[in-house]
Amino acid sequence: MNRIDLNILEKKAARLFFENKKKTYNIKQIKFFLNVKIDSIYIKDLLRNLFLKKCINITEHDKYSFNKSSVFLVGIIGKRKIKLIDLESSAELDISRKESTGFFENDEVYYSINKKGKVNILSVKKRTDQKFVGEVEINKNIKSVFIRKKNVRFIIDDKQAKKEDLVVVRLNDWKYEDPEGEVLKIIGKASDSEAQTHAILEEFSLPYVFSDKVEQETNNIKKEESIEKYREDHSSKLTFTIDPDDAKDFDDALSFKNLDDSSIEVGVHIADVSHYVKKETELDKEAFYRATSVYLADRVVPMLPEKLSNDLCSLNPREKKNVFSVFFIFSKNHKISNIKFCKSLIISDERLSYEEAQHIIENKENTIPAEKTILGNEKKVNKNLFDSIKKLYSISKSLKKEREEKGSIFFNKEEIRFKVDEKGSPVGYKIKKQKEANFLIEEFMLLANKAVATKIKENTRAGVYRVHDLPDEKKLVEIERFVKNLGYNNRLVNSQNINKEINTLLKACEGKPEKNVIDMMVIRAMSKAKYSSQNIGHFGLKFENYSHFTSPIRRYPDLMVHRILFSILKKEKYYDNEIEEKCFHCSQREELATKAERASIKLMQVKYMSKRLNEKFAGIVSGINERGVFVEVISNKCEGFVRMKDIPHDYFVYNYKTNSLMGQNTKEEYCLGDKVLIRVEKTNLEKKHIDFKILSKSE
């Protein structure tokens, strides 16, 4: 039975008075508003509490009204519901679990502070428009959806929703211990892989279906035959793309030309999405709302419909394509002597994978063996293309060296890519490593982004920049202490050149078991890069000016940058009085997409390890808290948790100061980076959780 919670009911009653400050109510009217079958004595008790909190007045005839003489504050419920953020001052206030009962994170509330400094939350002012995803359960004919992350159970009354369905639910009313929920969508069965993926997208409010309006508008876009007067024709120049072997859209290409004075012209060509996606169209509004493509473990959820991303805008081989180009002239010693921006027309002569390009870089023969080609057939590469890639690689090395000398930080974190069967289950994995071919493309994309940002900075105030602030000093202290225990002597705190020290550390741990843990710790210490119209520079890259220009098919900020740059080239003013709000929105959507990507990878890890119960793996301690340790398997990068009781030989206690576990009797210690042998104990698909047991420590 769903029991009445008087604390929750009191806050609901308070809302009646906050929203109707001029009205007076009697007990019968208040009871009708609360819509509960309860003795009036309880209603009087909760109204007396509101009176003592100076929220309401009580008249002689047992009538109740809002207390206009009291001053009430407004705040937002913070993370984990243990903090309240005051809206006016942004101050963080502690709140008890009892006070936050009946509310969700990000709910806007009225509150007061009593004489003892305790926060009293009086009523909700505005509910967060939050949707939740969970599995339907039935107990004693009562349907409910338990949201494990929020530790809340919604009671639902929906005839269509069946047991074990994954559903999207939102709050309907909260007057009982468990809130009443409204089912917005039935996703599918909890055991279905497709439904599990859609559930992740729904959880983070990421759309995966385009509306009929957007699809219709997209279908009406035609490929033009004529070339605009401002567009330069560079279709005769040697041009190619380098992408992952499974790529479906190609938004960047490089061109190469030897000039008469022994200098080299390199063109960075980016799909001209702004040519097809016009401002304020339904397509543009949808692209802005999505703001980014989402890269899940088994699929890509595109920002733009496939006709655009995979066809019209994609720089497919041997097709005429509209692009936005940045041309660089390099001298013999790889110094830039000139930069030119223009909209142009190109034809990509060849589509190469990173593995094919890597083979060209590493070898003297221009024939790529069948096992390294996209189609699985031996491939003979045109000599001009072969020589051009060699020269471009040489230039990219110079660019990378120059960046390193100036303090750009280089991460080369290994990533896992799962191979899935037709049912969406992982059947194998591949560890993705960055190689020279990746760095070749990266260097020219960084160069173009930097050049565009500088051009915008010099010509207009209406810029969209990719900014990155200084790292968290407390986290740098933790890293320094951690790596010292592993034998590294890098000084990250109070260093005259933090970037250089970080690079030295990342290079020193290359190829070692603790590499991934150190990489992750350094990444977590970094501030989040974001989009802004206020240019503060990019700490990680050590660039004064940096924008995103090179991926407009999958990032909306790049599309904004294209429009701004084109207005500069046309000598027109670019007006957008909401540019900072748009930057903020894009940063938020990017963060949601990243969370969804991580959840998707974790889901695949759980599925993969669920078929390997009782198997043993070598691992490394990747995290520690008061409940136990996290261990990352060295071979497949899957991370699981080891509870205190599953650590052998002793009773262990967590040390906050050293972030380690210590055995009470043996004094055995577990620290970040320790190598261990684990066994897979159990997995939980709903929680996306893997449990390990430590069998022994490794040397």
Image: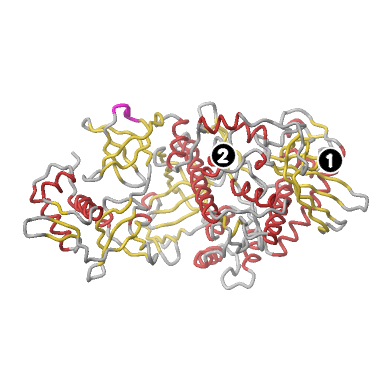
Asked whether residue 160 is drawn in magenta, I would say yes
> Which amino acid type corresponds to the residue marked 2 in the rendered image?
Thr
Residue 508 in view here? no
**Residue 182 x %, y %:** 31, 37
* Nearer the observer, 486 or 528: 528
| Quadrant into which the C terminus falls | bottom right
Magenta portion: prevailing SS class: loop
> To which residue does mark 1 refer?
237
Whether 622 is among the magenta residues is no
According to the picture, the residue beneath numbered tag 2 turns out to be 281
Instruction: Say which element carries label 2.
Output: loop
In the rendered structure, which disc, 2 or 1, sits on the residue that comes first in sequence?
A: 1
Which quadrant is home to the N terminus?
top left
Q: Which residues are magenta?
A: 159-164
Residue that sits furthest to the left in the current view: 61
Residue 409: x and y, percent? 65, 59
Q: Nearer the viewer, residue 136 or 52?
A: 52
Name the residue nearer the viewer: 585 or 336.
Answer: 585
